[in-house]
Amino acid sequence: AQSVTQLDSHVSVSEGTPVLLRCNYSSSYSPSLFWYVQHPNKGLQLLLKYTSAATLVKGINGFEAEFKKSETSFHLTKPSAHMSDAAEYFCVVSLHRTGGFKTIFGAGTRLFVKA
Amino acid sequence: NAGVTQTPKFQVLKTGQSMTLQCAQDMNHEYMSWYRQDPGMGLRLIHYSVGAGITDQGEVPNGYNVSRSTTEDFPLRLLSAAPSQTSVYFCASSAGGETQYFGPGTRLLVL
């Protein structure tokens, strides 16, 4: 069975300090992995995606994520948090199947950034 | 391009009422999906479509109907609204790969 686990429901950091949002997945196949961000009262926006190319993926707004197959992890990081990074972040697994693909969302991690 | 648009933004219904949530995309995407978002549960797939005339059920389809008569539109119908359907609904489209583009959402309250 496929699943996505975001290990923290809430993360709080100070502005200028590093961000780490953790994601583990379970899949029988090589999945595609995504991080989406949702700002308050907005839709979801793609931050970055991994599709079996380079294991370190760079996204928008200074975020990056590293795919570690041995640890089945895809953690999201940023060296220095900005106030504008405060939002909810979703780790997503996408699996190819006959006729299309199956998408599984993690429960989300809400990031708080303190001044 | 407007991307993915949804109407209405907000809606209040009484139990038993019916309504249709509208979704349209102007990117000529084949894949379209409807999700509901509830606190602490991420997004859950309601129904999806892989092209005009083709729809299928997702994880939580009960109480919802969809149709796909054109590539652009993918309406979601609530036949008899229940309080358990209070949620935020997102429509998404994809070109057939896996990156999805989301609409701004419809916030629904069922009393």
Image (spheres, coloured by chain):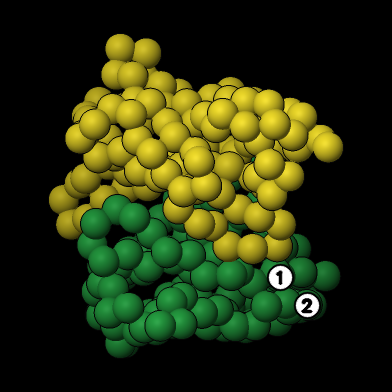
Chain colours: A yellow, B green
As measured in the structure, the alpha-carbon distance from the residue carrying label 1 to the one carrying label 2 is 6 Å
- The foreground one among A101 and A67 is A67
Q: Secondary structure beneath disc 2?
A: strand
Is disc 2 on the same chain as disc 1? yes
Q: Is residue A100 above or below residue A71?
A: below
Q: Name the residue type under label 1.
A: Leu
State the quadrant of the C terminus of chain A: top right
Query: What residue does disc 2 label?
Result: B12
Q: Chain of mark 2?
A: B
Query: What residue does disc 1 label?
Result: B108
A113 sits to left or right of B79: right
State the quadrant of the N terminus of chain A: top left
Number of numbered markers: 2
Furthest residue in direction left, as rendered: A98
**Residue A20: x %, y % from top left:** 58, 25
Residue depicted at x 54% and y 25%: A22
